[in-house]
Image (spheres, grey):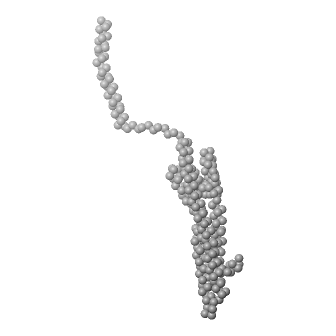
Amino acid sequence: MLSLINAAGWPIWFLIAASIAAVALIVERFLSLKRDKVLPPRLLDDVLMLHRNRQATPDMIQRLEASSPIGRVFATGLRQEFAPRDVMKESMEETGRAVAHDLEKYLSALGTIASMAPLMGLFGTVVGMIEIFGAQAPSGTNPQQLAHGISVALYNTAFGLVIAIPAMICYRHFRARIDSYLVEMEQQSLRLIDTLRSQHIAASPPVPPVPTPVSTAAAAAVAAASGAAAATAQRAAAPAAPRARAAAKGAKQ
């Protein structure tokens, strides 16, 4: 290994540092982006069951928030369960954006290494070419310096590609995995919102019918119509009373 480093020259140290950083980032993201850590199975069903059983206490919501990234989104929804649907959805979306930022942590650094490793290898190639031209002298060519320049150029180019290719593959893989996680988080969040809304509607008591208010003018019109009908009935019955008394008097005679 030391002989390889000596043959590649001093530019190889930049590539070695980049390779160590790339391996560390790949291992860290691989462990942090496991599905069981980001999207625990049956977590949504457990949350809905606890809410249905009236066990969604503040302590439970706090433990849910600390359990996983999607738990943070569910905890925000449970805290806003009595708010309107738009407010609840907007709060969960804001938490989801923060969760997405945390999931994408270190990916920019990994992408930078994947992009810069070939350039660092090209830098080593240029250094090797300089040594190759430096081997040419008026007195003749220095074979040892010429061979060292060629080895520096080739080793740095190859090592830069060896770093860049796996780093780019892992970067694309982690990016696709995060996108799929975010889509599934959004679907489960919408399901949580709709389920909580339906439970609140089912648990709310029926609203009694509100009587239609009658205006003062309408009440006065109804009273006037009733008085007029009563007066007409009295006038119709007034002539009939003397005739009834006369008929009764004639019968007695």
Is the residue 88 above or below the residue 223 in the image? Answer: below
The quadrant of the image that shows the C terminus is: top left
> Which residue of the protein is positioned furthest toward the top in this rendering?
253
Residue 61 in picture, x, y percent from top left: 61, 52
Which quadrant would residue 35 be assigned to in this image? bottom right
**Measuring 31% from the left and 8% from the top, which residue is drawn there?**
251
| Residue 186 in view in this figure | yes
**In the rendered view of the protein, which quadrant contains the N terminus?**
bottom right
Give how far across and how far down residue 106 sits, in percent: 60, 66
Residue farthest to the bottom? 139
Q: Position of residue 85 (x, y in %)?
A: 51, 50
**53, 213: nearer the viewer:** 53
Residue at point 62%, 68% (across, down)? 166
- Which residue: 60% across, 86% down? 133
Residue at image coords 61%, 93%: 138
Residue 15 in picture, x, y percent from top left: 63, 75
Note whether 104 is above or below 88 in the view shown: below
Q: Is residue 200 left or right of residue 35?
A: left
With 20 as the anchor, is 81 left or right in this view? left
**Residue 10 in sight here:** no
Between residue 211 and residue 36, name the one nearer to us: 36
